[in-house]
Image (spheres, helix red, strand yellow):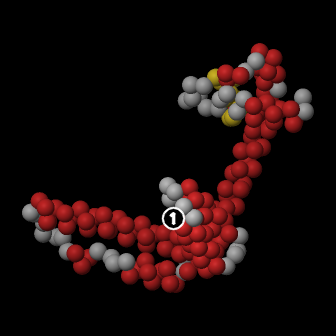
């Protein structure tokens, strides 16, 4: 059978590399790398089922090839992100700041509302946003990428799409200041058009 015909079957029945943990229809049970999972079984005909069983090695080869391609793309993308100067340092500073703020807020809440403070609680020990702001100035491209990443996590569809597009543009080497300005402008235009 031709590769194109197998691809049509893969798409039609949503065939994926399966796992033993899934309760869906599974063909093959011995090797986890040889399990095909058919996610769209309500349309499955006997003739197509026979073809899938007969062409299982070829379908597995196609699916493994696709999985390797996706892994390669993910690795390349991760390398691009890691190549942004200061990204790891800035992400760590933001995470530390958020954790410190949460811890500080919990301890302050106990002091204010519960009426007790631990003896070793010292508000001056907690980092201010100054470190994060200094790193934002030191690594503006990393700050722009993280801003776009935050927008991508938005529950608002348009904002999320704008953030995702900005992340890709920054990774592809476009001017981050212009990208962020356009992202914010497009979001404002969308908001005003409602």
Q: Quadrant of residue 101?
A: bottom left
Name the secondary structure under disc 1. Answer: helix
Identity of the residue furthest to the top in this view: 46
Disc 1 crowd, CA 10 A, few/some/many (<14, 14-19, 20+): some
Which residue is the site of mark 1? 150
Quarter that holds the C terminus: bottom right
> Along the horizontal axis of the image, is 83 left or right of 47?
left
What residue is rendered at 29% in x and 74% in y?
126
Q: Position of residue 40 (x, y in %)?
A: 67, 27
Work out which quarter of the rendered image holds the N terminus and state it: top right
Along the horizontal axis of the image, is 140 left or right of 115? right
| Whole-percent x, y for residue 17 in the image | 68, 35
Query: Picture coordinates of residue 36 (x, y %)?
Result: 70, 29
Q: Quadrant of residue 21?
A: top right
Tell me what residue is drawn at x 19 percent, y 67 percent: 108
In depth, the one of 151 and 186 nearer the eye is 186
Extreme-left residue of the structure = 115
Query: In the image, 71: left or right of 65?
Result: left
Of 80 and 158, which appears nearest the observer? 158
> Looking at the picture, does residue 122 appear above or below residue 27?
below
Name which residue lies at 37% across and 67% down.
Answer: 98
For image coordinates 68% across by 69% down, the residue present is: 169
Q: Is residue 130 left or right of residue 181?
A: left
Residue 171 seen: no
């Amino acid at each position: 059978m031709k590769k194109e015909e197998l691809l049509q079957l893969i798409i039609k029945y949503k065939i994926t590399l399966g796992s033993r943990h899934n309760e869906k229809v599974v063909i093959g049970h011995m090797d986890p790398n040889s399990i095909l999972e058919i996610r769209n079984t309500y349309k499955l005909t006997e003739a197509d089922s026979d073809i899938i069983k007969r062409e299982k090695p070829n379908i597995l080869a196609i699916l493994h090839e696709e999985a390797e391609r996706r892994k390669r793309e993910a690795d390349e993308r991760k390398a691009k992100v890691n190549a942004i100067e200061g990204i790891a340092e800035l992400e760590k500073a933001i995470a530390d700041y958020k954790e410190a703020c949460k811890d500080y807020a919990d301890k302050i809440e106990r002091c204010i509302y519960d009426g007790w403070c631990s003896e070793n609680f010292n508000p001056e020990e907690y980092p201010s946003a100054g470190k994060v702001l200094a790193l934002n100035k030191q690594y503006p491209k990393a700050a722009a990428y993280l801003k776009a990443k935050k927008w991508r996590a938005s529950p608002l569809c348009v904002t999320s799409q704008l953030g995702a597009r900005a992340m890709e543009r920054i990774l592809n080497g476009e001017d981050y200041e212009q990208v962020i300005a356009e992202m914010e402008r497009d979001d404002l235009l969308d908001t005003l058009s409602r």
